[in-house]
Image (spheres, rainbow, N blue to C red):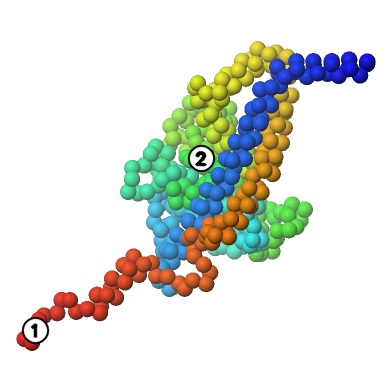
Amino acid sequence: MGFRRVAKFGWIAFLWSLSLTLLPILNGLLAGVLFCFWDRREVNNNMQHFTDELGEVSAQEYWTVPGAQSFSDYMDNTRAFHSTRLSTPRWTMQLDYQLPIEYYGDGGIDRWADLDHLMADVKSCNPAVPKESWVYITDLASPWFPYDDWNEAFDDLIQKSYVSHSLDATSFHFVECSHSAFLCGIWNVKPPALLHLSVEDSAPASDELDPDLTYAVDRKRLRPVTARIIELPVQDAFLGRPWHVFPSPKEQLQALISTPGLYEQFDPYDREEQIMKRFNEYMDSFWDWKGSVFYLMRRTESWCQDYITEPLGIESYLVDLQSLTFTVTFLLAQLILLPVQSAWQAVKDFFGYPGAGDWTFGGSDDPPTNFMEDMFGGFMQSMAGKDRFSQPTADS
């Protein structure tokens, strides 16, 4: 009899608690399922961008004259902003930085754009590697199209710094997301933005290095590189200043780049945080869809938060419950999705469907191709074998 009373009391308590926990649980379930598919889509997009951009670099090598500047370097150094454009996969070489040797073997392609294990070899370059670098990230930076306000502001800042020599110890570069979509995708950055890279003063201690990772030079020559992403426009006040102190793009960039140490007000780069920032923006498109179930759920959750959970002081517990539900749902969805993907890949392999890299590079045993010959399709050879423009003779 006592057990039945306890079970009945527990059931009543559970039903009563659902009035508070139902929405966080539903939100966690919904977000976990959507995140699984969103993450898979982002992975596929990044892989496609990676193969396309490597294929573009490979095709550009046809234009390279032995002993001269490569065509890829020419394209990256003759762009807008009077600075070098960073490109996949050469961005670390363009910055004189190093990634672990293991990153260039078998493994995830996201390691080609890793910002967590960057190192600078302080004795390899003359002049020395700059202590800090600013990378401006934009959608499009073409000298043949009008600039937007942020592009114009960055270009103006660089030209003034060259004239005044005020930032000679700083290097400037830019990333064009329409050209290097892989870098923007792996960094999960939304243009316009700034990427700040600072070289530390001392070599990393032995316990600070991953024992499974090695670099091309001795550890004593290496200096860790700390990355920070600042998405524009700046929404918060820094150094105690109100936001309207630098309202325009030019004033914001001038303050961020020229003020010593201002970048330290921003947290170092955290990839998981950037991923969730982009996913939350994706979810907002559902929550803001007026008239939908998502919109009604968000309005109901906001009302409960204002009038029930916050006055009761249980908001943090419900947030933890939603996070736990989200994580468990995502892992379960992955367990279901991975076998389905493996089976689908096996079907494509069975029918000879080419892999992602085969679309771009072809098979490893294929002979080298000449893209000019592909374009003309044998037209020049056919013209060379026929004297179409010769003068008629007396016999004809």
Nearest the camera: 83 or 116?
A: 116
Quadrant the C terminus occupies: bottom left
Using the numbered discs, state the Cα–Cα distance from disc 1 to disc 2 in whole angstroms: 71 Å
Q: Which mark is residue 396?
A: 1
Nearest the camera: 139 or 278?
A: 278
Q: From the viewer's perspective, is residue 65 above or below residue 149?
A: below
Amino acid type, label 2: Lys
Q: Mark 2 points at which residue?
A: 190
Q: Residue furthest bottom?
A: 395
Lateral position of residue 362 relative to residue 197, left or right: left
**Can you see residue 354?**
yes
Nearest the camera: 34 or 95?
A: 34
Q: From the viewer's perspective, is residue 368 above or below residue 308?
A: below
Q: Which mark is residue 28?
A: none
Identify the residue shown where x is 48% and y is 59%.
Answer: 359
Secondary-structure class at tag 1: loop
Label 2, residues with CA under 10 Å away: few <14, some 14-19, many ≥20: many
Amino acid type, label 1: Ser
Q: Which comes before the other along the chain, label 1 or label 2?
A: 2
Identify the residue shown where x is 52% and y is 54%.
Answer: 50
Q: Position of residue 57 (x, y in %)?
A: 46, 61
Nearest the camera: 86 or 387?
A: 387
**Pointer 1 with pointer 2, Cβ within 8 A:** no
